[in-house]
Image (tube, helix red, strand yellow):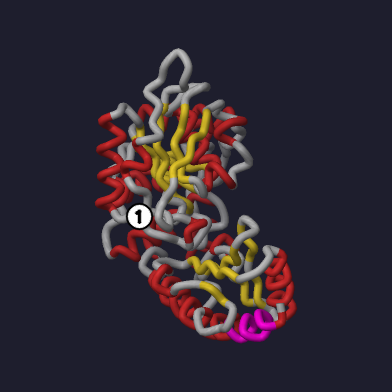
Amino acid sequence: MKPSDFRSDTVTHPTEEMYRAMRDAPLGDDILGDDPTVRKLEALAAERTGKEAALFVPSGSMSNTIAIRVQTTPGDAVLLEEWNHSLNFEAGAPAAVCGVITRTYPSNQGVPEVDDVISRVFPGSLHTPATRLLVIENTHNLHGGAVVPPARVRELYEAAKERGLAVHLDGARLFNAAVALGVDAREITRHADTVNFCLSKGLSCPVGSLFCGPRPLVDHGRRFRKTLGGAMRQAGILAACGIVALETMIARLADDHRHARALAEGLARVPGAILDPADVRTNIVMLRLDGPPSRYGRLQEGLKQRGVLGNVVAGRMFRFVTHRHVGPADVERALGAVAEVVPKL
């Protein structure tokens, strides 16, 4: 039997409409600026985020790295939440590629307090780096797909601007946040200078992310994409999937959210499983266990033996992610497997 794969929403495959779009996409050479399908995707992404321009890149990690690079200089400081993706899961790119100092701020399940952020801003002096950029992650992966409300993003943006900081929104799952809040994505992105969002997660594209912002920053990012080796040729084959995703795949994210909540409610009834279903707002469910961290590895192996795939994250929790390839039957399968394995750990 095919496994129920909750490892990530990146395991999704293109839809049939995406495959047709790939076959029929008009193509050019994107490095030379004449791939019409890439240009169409970038214009659509800019419109959907309310920004002046957008840049198609291979990955969200590259998009976030570009955002940091074009808004800082080496030796500057960047503020990131302590479990932020760029800080913890992008292979040290802020330091290795951008040459910046990273400072962290805490949050309440992914939602930061303004005072906690602003208290960590360095104005820059003979002894201290100047803080130039604030990064906000929304939804927040390591806090279980938590959504940062637009009002809080606005407060953070205004406080950052008063102190001369740029603001980057890592919206890898931006449209999950928009669907959960019942708002247009532009309500979330309007209080950010630059935005990253991924096509290759719940939107089911095989590859790609978009870096969005003012045209001068996007033009700078286009050159830095080349530096990073991320410039592509007939990239319209991939961009075609992104167009389909933005036009057809956003509303269905609500199904993933319902499945995640059903999974969380069932897990909460398993003795020894620690989670609050009320914390599950989007498509990520974080399960905690009492006892030593080694229990998570044993849980992963036990579930795998029963045809359920998930991930141990940061050695301190077990993550399930819902997407269009898992449905109610997969949720029930996962619940049965967890109920069988956890008491034996």
Above or below — where is 57 with respect to 178? above
Which residue: 40% across, 34% down? 120
- Residue found 64% across the figure and 63% down from its top: 312
Assign the C terminus to one quadrant of the image. Answer: bottom right
* Picture coordinates of residue 293, whole percent (x, y): 68, 63
Q: Nearer the viewer, residue 117 or 197?
A: 117
What is the magenta range? 335-343
Tell me the residue that label 1 is attached to. 148
Drawn side of residue 193 relative to residue 274, left or right: left
Look at 43% across and 69% down and name the residue there.
Answer: 280
| 17 vs 332: above or below | above
Crowdedness of circle 1 by 10 Å Cα count: few (<14), some, many (20+)?
many
Magenta segment, prevailing SS (helix, strand or loop): helix
Q: Position of residue 128 (x, y in %)?
A: 46, 21
Left or right, residue 112 beside residue 270: left
The image quarter containing residue 136 is: top left
In front here: 257 or 152?
152
Q: Secondary structure at mark 1?
A: loop
Image quadrant where residue 226 sits:
top right
> How far across and how far down the image is residue 294, in percent?
72, 65
| Residue with the most extreme top position | 126
Tell me the residue at 28%/50% (across/down): 152
Q: Viewed as shown, does residue 38 lie left or right of 186? A: right
Q: Quadrant of the N terminus?
A: bottom right
Q: Amino acid at mark 1?
A: Val
Query: In the rendered structure, does residue 339 fall within the stretch colored magenta?
Result: yes
Q: Is residue 1 visible?
A: no
Location of residue 32 in the rendering, given as x and y in whole percent from the top left corner: 51, 31
Q: Who is closer to the viewer here, 13 or 212?
A: 212
